[in-house]
Amino acid sequence: MTGRRPRLDPATARIRNALRAHCRPQDTTPVIVAVSGGADSLALAAAAAFLHRRGEGRFLACTVDHGLQPGSAQVAAQVVDRVEALGLPVTSVTTEVDPHHSGGLEAAARSGRYAALAAIAHSAPPHGAIPQILTGHTRDDQAETVLLGLLRGSGARSLSGMAPRTRFDTANGPIKIGRPLLGVTRDETRQSCAAQDLEVWDDPMNDDTRFTRVRARRTLELLRDSLGQDPRAGLARTADLLREDADHLDAEAAAAWADLLTSAQENASVQGRAPQDGDVSLQGNVPVHDDTAAPASLAVRDLAAFGPAVTSRILRLWLVDRGVAAGELTADHVRDVREVAAASGAVKREASVPGGGVVRRTGDRILHVGSGREDQGRP
């Protein structure tokens, strides 16, 4: 009688295939797997260990102790033991969380975690490439993100949720965040852990209704019970569809912004002078700027050539290149600036932007003046 190999659990197979599809075999830089000990990240770590043993990638696991709960160091040590038992190299780091973070405790923990992971990732050879860190975000997390975006009245980019791959700048250098499990459910990660006899740590903060995301999770459960249909799959699909649209609009705006800059630089070169403030136009009949490498002003007629969605994106690129903090620049700020650009007569002709600056309409141009800036960028 020949022995048969035990049938692979479908959830485990799905997670392994998702990770295999996400990772590029030609990548030589080690991939860091962020592991909290919860079902999502532990199932991901188990899949990474499987591929690691087969030579289908180089993986290193890392758990971060935020020090937010009593006994957190013990939990981190237990996570290390469980991941080591899987046969995956693992390390543990501690980080301090800023209690006064403007985004709240959740955002502070995320920033601290990514910075700590970035330090580990950048210390691993080979050096020079931007390292990738994998998280265990699932379809459930995606649905919660979209729901929270809807409650804020967000636009397409925010409602597109978490992308499978995202660049994230930290205090310890840039990283690429990879999310291979966005098509996998939370139930599947738990099923996979159970099938592999993996002991899961349930973070008590995941049941703490002081946190907005926990309340969003409860709301999705109520919607499911009330409607008789699970809304999570639909919300995640909406995110995928909106991401395609947002990516296209972002690319169109980026190309238009590049044309604006190139036109101004070429015009300045023809005139035999360096680009100056107040000089950017698709028609190339004025100068580019100061030390920020972005023009102080834009021609209104150039913006009028685009629809509202692309115009808003161009204005955002302009302001960020002018030094306005991207994380503080909201859709409301951009909308106000767009209204200034479209203003005529006695209509609103000035809008405030983060950092103490303003954007004002001067003739046929809009001008950004930062807080305390000497340049006025007048045409």
Image (cartoon, rainbow, N blue to C red):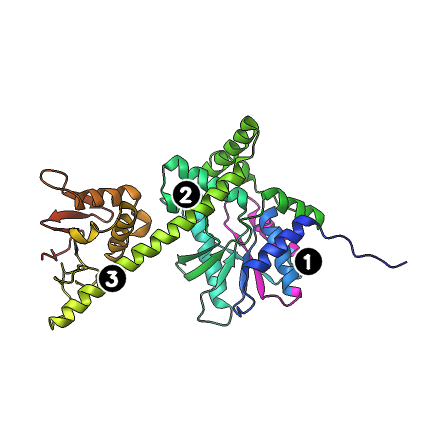
Q: Where is residue 187 in the image (x, y as percent from the top left)?
A: 62, 42
**Residue 85 tag number:** 1
Q: In this view, does 64 lie above or below 129?
A: above
* Residue drawn at (44%, 60%) of the image: 175
Secondary structure under tag 3 reads helix
Quarter holding residue 274: bottom left
Disc 1 versus disc 3: distance between alpha carbons?
55 Å
Q: For this view, does 62 lie left or right of residue 85? A: left
| Front residue of 133 and 311 | 311
* Residue drawn at (23%, 49%) of the image: 355
Q: Residues within 10 Å of mark 2 (few under 14, many from 20)?
A: many
Residue receiving disc 3: 259
**Residue 159 tag number:** 2
| Front residue of 294 and 305 | 305
Q: What stretch is highlighted in magenta?
A: 53-82
Which amino acid type is marked by label 2? Leu
Which amino acid type is marked by label 1? Ala
Q: For this view, does 338 lie left or right of residue 160? A: left
Q: For this view, does 53 lie left or right of residue 363? A: right
Q: Are marks 1 and 3 in contact (CB under 8 Å)?
A: no
Q: How crowded is mark 1: few (under 14 residues within 10 Å), some or many (20 or more)?
A: few
Say whether residue 80 is visible: no
Which amino acid type is marked by label 3? Asp
- Observer-side mark, 2 or 3, equals 3
